[in-house]
Amino acid sequence: MMIQPLEGRRLFSVAVTEGYPGFYEIHADDGGNVVDVSVSSADDTFTLNGTTYAGLQYLTVYGGAGNDTIHLTADAPSYFGAGVVAGGGDDDVSLNFDGAVWAGDGNDTVRLADAFRGEVYGQAGNDRMYITGETVDAQIDGGAGNDLIDATGNHYSVIVYGGAGNDTIYGSEFDDQLYGGEGNDVLYGNGGDDVLYSGSNQGDRAYGGAGDDSLYGTVSSWNVDGVEHIYNG
């Protein structure tokens, strides 16, 4: 019988651990770190700083308090997933397979692509979030701050919550649900039969775009264009 120790390595300011077999964690310190992970779908491995780890099932990355760059890139679709907890600081995060991102405090940039049921939580700060590719059943929450959420490059519908702050939200070309939340928000439905929710703020603007769109809220009539059905109150 062979007993194989679980992974536990420190690479510069980043530590890699494997708790349960196949479930890895990457912990960055509170400095400004670059965590650039390459994932191989063919052999279920990931590589960080020249070291390759086998048997990947799920990967969690913790960014720490600094201004981190965290990129998780898979070479093809696969069954494994990932979670990124970026932490404080102005972080730059990208993920192109199934998973979720918690951006944390700070003015963050998040790019989510090709993630089945992908999720992004901007949390505090003026964040920029881009949803693209084959991201199916995406759920996006801007959180507090003046956020930009752009799903124009996604090939499926999205559900987006702007949260508190003056947000700008662009839907996909499909049947989206866009919720402005608190603040003076701008909602662009784009193509598809969209449902836009402005809340109770008269300062919101809503542009339905192509399709049979509906608006719920108290937006002034001069701030609405391309919406076929308006339900005030």
Image (cartoon, helix red, strand yellow):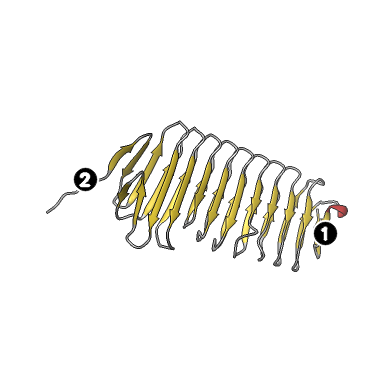
The amino acid at mark 2 is Pro
Instruction: Give the mark nearer the N terminus: 1 vs 2.
Output: 2
Q: Residue at x 25, y 45 (%)?
A: 6
Would residue 4 appear left or right of 172 to someone viewing this image? left
Mark 1 neighbour density, 10 Å: few (under 14) some (14–19) many (20 or more): few
Would residue 233 appear left or right of 7 to someone viewing this image? right
Q: Depth check: 30 or 233 in front?
A: 30
Q: Depth check: 44 or 125 in front?
A: 44
- Give the residue number, with chain letter if any, for mark 1: 225
Image coordinates for residue 49, horizontal then vertical, percent: 36, 43
* Residue at the limit of the structure toward the front, as seen here: 50
Circle 1/circle 2 CB separation < 8 Å: no
Image coordinates for residue 149, horizontal then vertical, percent: 64, 50
Q: Residue at x 30, y 49 (%)?
A: 20
- Give the residue number, with chain letter if any, for mark 2: 5
Image coordinates for residue 204, horizontal then vertical, percent: 78, 48
Asked if 187 appears above or below 61 in the picture, the reply is: below
**Secondary element type, mark 2:** loop
Quadrant where the N terminus lies?
Answer: bottom left
The amino acid at mark 1 is Asp
C-alpha span from label 1 to label 2: 62 Å
* Residue at the limit of the structure toward the top, as seen here: 31
